[in-house]
Amino acid sequence: MNPAADPPRRSRRPAWADRNYSLLTAAAFVTNLGSHGALIAAAFAVLEAGGDGGDVGLVAAARTLPLVVFLLIGGAVADRLPRHHVMVAANALNCVSQGAFGILVLAGHPQLWQMMLLTALGGTGQAFFSPAAEGMLLSSVKGEQAGRAFAVFRMAMQGAALGGAALGGAMVAAIGPGWVLAADAVAFAVAGSLRSFLDVSHIPVREPGGGMLSDLREGWREVAGRPWLWGIVVQFSIANAVVAAADAVYGPLVARDHLGGAAPWGLALGFFGAGTVAGALLMTRWKPRRLLFVGTLCVFPFALPSAALAVPVSVGWLCAAMFVAGATVEVFGVSWMTALHQEIPEDKLSRVSAYDWFGSVALVPLATALAGPVESAFGRAGALWGCAALVVVVTAGVLTVPDVRNLRRNTKHVAQGEQGAGNGSADTESPVGGLG
């Protein structure tokens, strides 16, 4: 047979899944597989070292505090430097900090300040990684299939969360939290290696401009000019804070006292991951026209897990609540990424993502640090019912913003970054933009 006569081989990947997208998806799968197990391991490492709920909250806060402090700087850096270099450096820092944390736990008798310090280093790496990673993903997807691409990416990411949480909980129960933390360090090393092969030649070189403060002001103008964007950022600053307190502090305590320990809690978190996979799978087919209105309606069930822990319900009912919450909040997640991709210029993606991340995590250190005192003042059930109520209230509040209700999906093929000013994508008199 003449090889020249053979028909060209068709790529097994869809057109929107190019090399960068594939590398980003594979790396996100690896890091989420390790990190979701490590979240459980860190909480139970503190408890096994003799800590209480307040100590678990302090360690969780130690991770989030530097994330809040350095996020905006990380966004500005990621829009100036090659984003994949920022991502690899951040992965290296996370690898070292998690590896040291694992060794410390395996050696026995870790001190609270040591665990807080190493967790803070991990949060610092995340502060530089997250804006760079989101900007890189958003700039790597183009065309009408952007929503499907984001859904598939998030489905892979959340599938790893499903496996990581369930496996992490089982591993903590079987071999202890130290080995789970060490495995997470290896996952960061593998993911960093994959991200080192990303190609950023398609991203235009930025013209020399002002300094860091000028970059941050420019990014803020992008956010402040879009009521839908800053409105949802405010919403999630509160919702994420109370859910983080419920998951990082109250959840492990309820699991220890009522559900049987780490393994059932890991199973429940795994069901949340399964729900997010189901939600992302739905979004590969469903393209709601009113992106943020539909997405925001789907945030209400985010309150279900806190309410289930407040009762507390059986493991089966908790898993069901987790599944529904995961599925519906993932509808919001895909809609949000699609709106950002549609509305924000490419050269400002990381800075806008940084403001989004900053708002989303700004109150988490305070909420997790106060989780113990709030439990002492109102009881664990009262604190958890308060978490559920706050999610409902802030979600109802953001629906009063006209741009949230009226932002339309752009059905025309527009290259990413050509809109970015909120023009022409909504049937409303107010300019609208996108959120993350």
Image: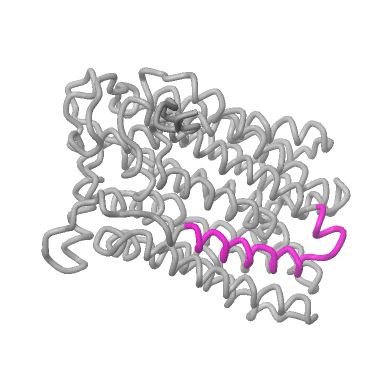
Q: Quadrant of residue 435?
A: top left
Residue 350, percent from left and from top? 31, 53
Residue 55, percent from left and from top? 68, 69
- For image coordinates 70% across by 73% down, the residue present is 102
Q: Nearer the viewer, residue 285 or 2?
A: 2
Position above or below: 101 against 28 = below
- For image coordinates 32% across by 59% down, the residue present is 75
Position above or below: 46 against 327 = below
Residue 376, percent from left and from top? 71, 59
Residue 81, percent from left and from top? 27, 64
Q: Quadrant of residue 159?
A: top right
Q: Quadrant of the C terminus?
A: top left
**Residue 248 horizontal side relative to residue 16, left or right:** right
Is 176 part of what is drawn in magenta?
A: yes
Q: Tag count in the figure?
A: 0
- For image coordinates 48% across by 25% down, the residue present is 297
Q: Nearer the viewer, residue 389 or 335?
A: 335
Magenta stretch?
170-194
**Residue 145 horizontal side relative to residue 253, left or right:** left
Q: Is residue 30 visible?
A: yes
- For image coordinates 51% across by 43% down, the residue present is 239
Is 288 part of what is drawn in magenta?
A: no
Q: Is residue 151 visible?
A: no
Outermost residue, front side: 1
The figure's colour scheme reads: one colour
Q: Nearer the viewer, residue 18 or 165?
A: 18
Dominant secondary structure, magenta: helix
